[in-house]
Image (cartoon, coloured by chain):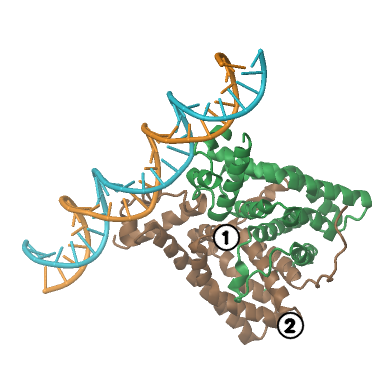
Chain colours: A green, B brown, C cyan, D orange
Amino acid sequence: MQDDTRERILEAAEALFAEHGFSRTSLRAITARAGVNLAAVNYHFGSKHALIQAIFTRRLEPINQERLARLEALRRQGRADLEAILEAFIAPTLKSEKDHHPGEVRFMRLLGRTHAGAADALRDFVHGLYAEVLAAFEQALVEALPELPRLELHWRLHFLMGVVSFTMAGTDTMRLFTDCHLPEAGDREALLRRLIPFLAAGLRAPLAPTERRPSLP
Amino acid sequence: MQDDTRERILEAAEALFAEHGFSRTSLRAITARAGVNLAAVNYHFGSKHALIQAIFTRRLEPINQERLARLEALRRQGRADLEAILEAFIAPTLKSEKDHHPGEVRFMRLLGRTHAGAADALRDFVHGLYAEVLAAFEQALVEALPELPRLELHWRLHFLMGVVSFTMAGTDTMRLFTDCHLPEAGDREALLRRLIPFLAAGLRAPLAPTERRPSLP
DNA sequence: CAAGAATTCAAACGATCGTATGATTCAAAC
DNA sequence: GTTTGAATCATACGATCGTTTGAATTCTTG
């Protein structure tokens, strides 16, 4: 029961952080859920902040490695079309449930919310974990969309990150429109089939004319 | 100097909440920035939670009224095409800076982050402020995209909310891809010219085939 | 100007937080 | 079986939090 404690803390913290946020989750709540002593967090991780970083590093590293592996496989096969690139980027964040890691679903929710919300040094830390992957995908998209100006591509990548982060965050926004909730979010394949056409069409959208008609009176 | 205090508190709280989040912003920091006494918050608003709600109500109500007014004007003119509907929904959240209300920019950032991140009762409260507006725009989009199945429209509205919220949140995601930051986010007209074609193309995207090719080995 | 309501103020309360401490338990090495 | 270092434990510290209180002040109204 040596590094079992570490794992139990990571598991409990991940769940509570995803549900209540970082600052509203106390170390006491984490250690109580994990069934370990309060001091175990500072013993194994050093501080609450270091625990948060450990959570992101553990989950994000394999996901990003899979992203790069998928992208490289596409390049080898010569079929790096836009839809395939998008799938290589998004699928590793969605297919986790069937891989018997239910905790990863909670983590993606946590990651999405952190992306949109975190203002402090944590976002910079997460960005650091992303840097290599995003540079590779940016280059792939430049080649897949050669006619798109670089600045426009950057904006559309910003929009893309918005869609992906928001979907990962899993806020049940759909019931804003009607009474229907997200239908069985467990069906990740169906989600991919809806996300990728939406994003591909947005990335391929024709450029807006330089001048726009005036707004309403 | 009676309800000037109320206003100073709202202003300071809005700025600090947008920068550091709700739970990491103390009432002492708010009242210090506002130059008022600590007890003034509980005297004028009742509690920290009620202060947060007051912030959202104050800003969101006029924005949503303008959204509905723009949409109704489109209907009267018979030009409720997709792009115009999107502009009616998005423009009121972006044009605020030139209206001499710099605080509204900070608020939209706060709103975007709350949309993606808040898990507690606050999100339900904000959703309540949105309900009427989103029902109206959903109906307009149903008419503008008659060939799109209702379920698919719901998903794409979810994606749309992701883009809008993420853009409002204003997290400087673009420097993930290169070293360039968001170029002069003050130019709201340019942002509209980029957002609307992206979203319109996504909403109009052809449906994906029911079966997809398998993923990578 | 005086009376009463509205507002502001300094100060404190109880609770909770992250972290640190020193004793205690446990497991492997000799 | 003894020793040694890692791990766990109960406990406490100092800080900060949201909220409350009651007196002091300001404003309104007659």
Same subunit, tags 2 and 1 = yes
**In this rendering, is residue C13 above or below A98?**
above
Left or right: C16 in relation to A203:
left
Q: Residue at x 59, y 78 (%)?
A: B135
Chain ID of residue with mark 2: B
Residue marked by disc 1 = B112
Examine the image and state in which quarter residue B144 appears: bottom right
Q: Position of residue A211 (x, y in %)?
A: 71, 68
* Secondary structure state at the residue bearing disc 2: loop
Of the numbered discs 2 and 1, the one sitting upstream in the chain is 1
Amino acid on which disc 1 is placed: Gly
| Residue receiving disc 2 | B146
Where is residue A93? Give x, y as percent. Answer: 73, 54
Q: Is residue A18 above or below residue C27?
A: below
Q: Quadrant of residue B212?
A: bottom right
- The x and y percentages for residue B133 are 56, 76
Asked if the residue under mark 1 is in contact with the one under mark 2, i.e. CB atoms within 8 Å, the reply is no
Q: CA distance from mark 2 to mark 1?
A: 29 Å
**Residue lying at 54% horizontally and 52% vertically, measured from the top left:** A21
Using residue B48 as the reference point, say whether residue A206 is left or right of it: right
Q: Quadrant of the C terminus of chain A?
A: bottom right
Q: Amino acid at mark 2?
A: Pro
Work out whether residue A69 can be spotted.
Answer: yes
Front position in the image: A156 or B100: A156
Assess disc 1: are there few (<14), some (14-19) or many (≥20) residues with their C-alpha within 10 Å of its C-alpha.
many
Question: Residue A44 shows which numbered tag?
Answer: none
* Residue A203 in the figure: left or right of residue A14: right
Sort mark 2 into few (<14), some (14-19) or many (20+) by Cα contacts within 10 Å. few
